[in-house]
Amino acid sequence: MKTYDIALIPGDGIGKDVTGAAWQVMQAAAKRGGFALDGTRFPWSCAYYLETGAMMPPDGIETLRKFNAIYLGAVGWPAEVPDSVSLHGLLLPIRKGFTQYANIRPHRLLPGVQGPLRSDGFDILCIRENTEGEYSGAGGRVHSGTANEVAVETSIFTRAGVERIIRFGFEQARARRKKLASVTKSNAQKHSMVFWDEVTREVAKDYADVEVSHYHIDAIAARMVLAPESLDVIVASNLFGDILTDIGAAIQGGLGYAASANINPDRSAPSMFEPVHGSAPDIAHLGVANPIAAIWSGAMMLEHLGEGHAAAQVMSAIESITARGIGTIAGKDRTETITQAVLAALS
Amino acid sequence: MKTYDIALIPGDGIGKDVTGAAWQVMQAAAKRGGFALDGTRFPWSCAYYLETGAMMPPDGIETLRKFNAIYLGAVGWPAEVPDSVSLHGLLLPIRKGFTQYANIRPHRLLPGVQGPLRSDGFDILCIRENTEGEYSGAGGRVHSGTANEVAVETSIFTRAGVERIIRFGFEQARARRKKLASVTKSNAQKHSMVFWDEVTREVAKDYADVEVSHYHIDAIAARMVLAPESLDVIVASNLFGDILTDIGAAIQGGLGYAASANINPDRSAPSMFEPVHGSAPDIAHLGVANPIAAIWSGAMMLEHLGEGHAAAQVMSAIESITARGIGTIAGKDRTETITQAVLAALS
Ligand SMILES: CC(C)[C@H](C(=O)O)[C@@H](O)C(=O)O
Ligand SMILES: CC(C)[C@H](C(=O)O)[C@@H](O)C(=O)O
């Protein structure tokens, strides 16, 4: 039987609850689809850090490399471990270390989910650059602690880095409605963002069949609220993609529905799948986290593994339960109830 | 009679239409209030650039310095003049040159205006840093035009720059519901944004009566859509404030309602008032631009000049016409119709 080796990193807080839920659903889909998912669990998390002094072992990245895919719940426990440690010690090194340069996040309303907007007809795919740009980490301070203190943070964009994500965006647009929105702030950031615009114009020559629009981040953020139905595929830098995908999550009803895939398109290393939400310390261990984003992320993993049919079945199962009002109202249904309903719909 | 000297820069496109509208209303309010506004018009704009090669004369900033306030419509005409020229040649130099470090933008629904959100009860005041940060302009490129090209853009935050805007934010919060939301992305940008958080925590010691919350930009962007009623005063960096205020504009019904003040709180130089919207080339010269944002910005100018009573009368006039459905539906009422209605309500 075809077997995929999956690294499971449940992480912290509700990351653990939703990973359990998503994994049960993925297993059920595999069974139906005639393939196997062999999961190896890694306890890397803030708890692990408090015990060992590191979010993962020094050879963590090398350990993960041999897997077919990585599934991550959520990391972070800010009360005990600063974000700078938890995220820069686990999540961000995996994204960068495995050149998962395309962070894909779908935004649409599941049937039965009422979003915050009066208008509901949108179907957006955000493609976020995931390895450089505003998250490069370059910078520092001078005159620390004095009145004269200065902090600088440098965004670094490379031609290869920008070109590959824009090309990826065009490919996605070509496979959908052939409309690509490229996002910058070139009217204020004249080095990095003018560069992004230039590269977009060059790559566009290879995709004459795709209509490209150039938006400033402020304008497209407003557009996602005022006229989301006018958007299809969006390609944006690391920071701008981060912001837009949280707005995308909001208009689709909240972070409980926002799935994501961190893709290494060349398949030179594993890709990673994770719900967009964080570890949500306030509701951790209560069994009330909505696992739908996590299950949807699992479907994206099955799709990436080449099991498109199984992925589609998981999506249908999700849609059939939300259409019946299960998992559609924040806090109403327990994690377990929603998971069992998806499992029942799958079988 | 008390007379204020106002520099009027109508700018480009609908900037000209809405400045005319706002100026009529401000004049009427002045007449009723027993003070005078003496306007001097400056044709600085993209048209001016095409004629003279500059957006304003070399001594433009010095010329403006002697005015009590500056009122600006909108600048930009991207088809003929790149944004890098139009904005960096006029708007941004005024903001920076006159240390207008606090960009204030109110977001609430005017009576009769239906916003895009199902939930309508919010009243947010965004305070945006307006002189440094992500808009510092520092950066450059190496290996231009080669496969090895790299573009960098450096955000520069100074202690004085961050401290004064945060202090300003606290003062505003103290005058309202004593709730301040400070916005960063310190989990990913560990130099600039961790610095901002530190300064916020220090300044907070002087404002024990104000409750401070720390949000990441992605989370608060989503919150503005999902639970805007939970926010009151927001203080954010130049870029983050730019993005949040466009979301604010969106939830209040669109850019036709988004007013702004670029304030020099020390009054060492004039402040500038402008609607948030741009020059909107697509609807320029059609007489259909909504002047409400511009008129509201005029009210903010009156308030800043110390004419709080006149400012309040302008706001009541605006609210009384929107409550009657005038100016509440995009494109329905002409600029002139709305302006006349406000004037009638004022008298
Ligand atoms: C936790 C944080 C560093 C992360 C990001 O900004 O990338 C998260 O917000 C996300 O969107 O995946
Ligand atoms: C035109 C642009 C440079 C400007 C900005 O980003 O500051 C505008 O978007 C605004 O918000 O006033």
Image (cartoon, coloured by chain):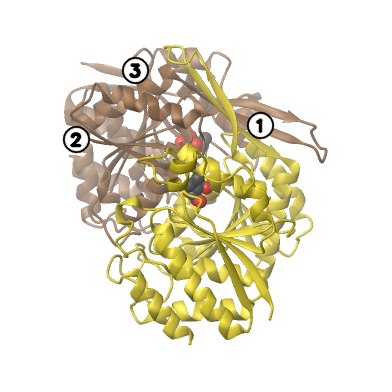
Chain colours: A brown, B yellow
Q: CA distance from mark 3 to mark 1?
A: 38 Å
Q: Disc number at residue A122?
A: none
Q: Choose top left, top right, bottom left or bottom right for residue A72.
A: top left
What residue sits 42% from the left and 85% below the top? B344
| Protein chain holding label 1 | A
**Amino acid marked by disc 1:** Val
Up-down: is A92 above or below B64? Answer: above
Circle 3 residue? A68
Q: Is residue A277 visible?
A: no
**Amino acid marked by disc 2:** Ala
Q: Disc number at residue A152?
A: 1
**In the structure shown, which secondary structural element does the residue marked by tag 2 occupy?**
helix
Q: Looking at the image, is mark 3 or mark 2 earlier in the sequence?
A: 3
Q: Residue at the bottom extreme?
A: B347
Circle 2 residue? A312
**In the structure shown, which secondary structural element does the residue marked by tag 1 occupy?**
strand
Q: CA distance from mark 3 to mark 2?
A: 20 Å
Q: Quadrant of the C terminus of chain A?
A: top left
What residue sits 75% from the left and 52% below the top? B203
What residue sits 39% from the left and 58% below the top? B14
